[in-house]
Amino acid sequence: MTELLPDNIAALAEQVLDSNREAGRRIAVAESCTGGLVAAALTEWPGSSEVFERGYVTYSNAAKQEELGVSSDIIDAFGAVSIAVAWAMAKGALQKSGADIAVSITGVAGPGGGTEKKPVGTVVFACIKKGDDPDKVVAELKRFGEDLSRDEIRRQAALCALELFLP
């Protein structure tokens, strides 16, 4: 489909758009370490505006707080790369966008910035649907590995995020 994105990401984005269109759902994404890669994949396809409501690129902690309403207390307590922050990002994206489903991504793409507890390649995802009980939010921490390049970590994270939009 596109020269900007690998075929596997583009194909999955098309599948996400098709399945959510069929379900009558609007989607939103809140991205940190992927820097808009998921939104770019979704908007590569004609007709994406029927499904894709909006994307937030909240790379800094300040952006997470200002754009998505993530509490500084949560960031201070758990760190920006945490299930708590991913959950708060997804919740903020859902509330502020009016979408039916929101996915968030936050992580350490490298090559620097990793720690012993959160090495390079650590990425956290969350997904929330309108009307869901907050206890039913899907959140997951993945470690893609410190040996992968920054680009590959971002691509793998985008794939995982897109998969969360599927039924």
Image (cartoon, helix red, strand yellow):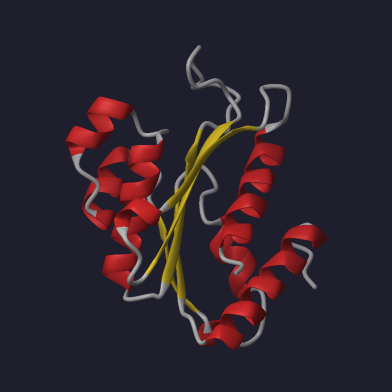
Residue sitting at 42 percent across and 33 percent down? 81
Residue sitting at 46 percent across and 79 percent down? 26
Q: Is residue 94 left or right of residue 62?
A: right
Total labels: the figure holds 0
From the image, which quarter does the C terminus lie in?
Answer: bottom right
Residue, far top: 116
Q: Is residue 133 left or right of residue 24?
A: left
Q: Is residue 20 left or right of residue 1?
A: left
Viewer-proximal residue among 39 and 136: 136
Residue 155 at what x, y percent from top left? 68, 47
- To which quarter of the image does residue 62 belong? top left
Q: Is residue 9 above or below residue 19?
A: above
Residue 86 at what x, y percent from top left? 39, 45
Q: Is residue 96 left or right of residue 50?
A: left
Q: Is residue 93 above or below residue 43?
A: above
Viewer-proximal residue among 132 and 87: 132
Q: Is residue 150 visible?
A: yes
From the image, which quarter does the N terminus lie in?
Answer: bottom right
Residue 47 at what x, y percent from top left? 61, 87
Q: Is residue 80 above or below residue 111?
A: below
Q: Is residue 5 visible?
A: no
Residue sitting at 70 percent across and 73 percent down? 15
Residue sitting at 31 percent across and 49 percent down? 88
- To which quarter of the image does residue 8 belong? bottom right
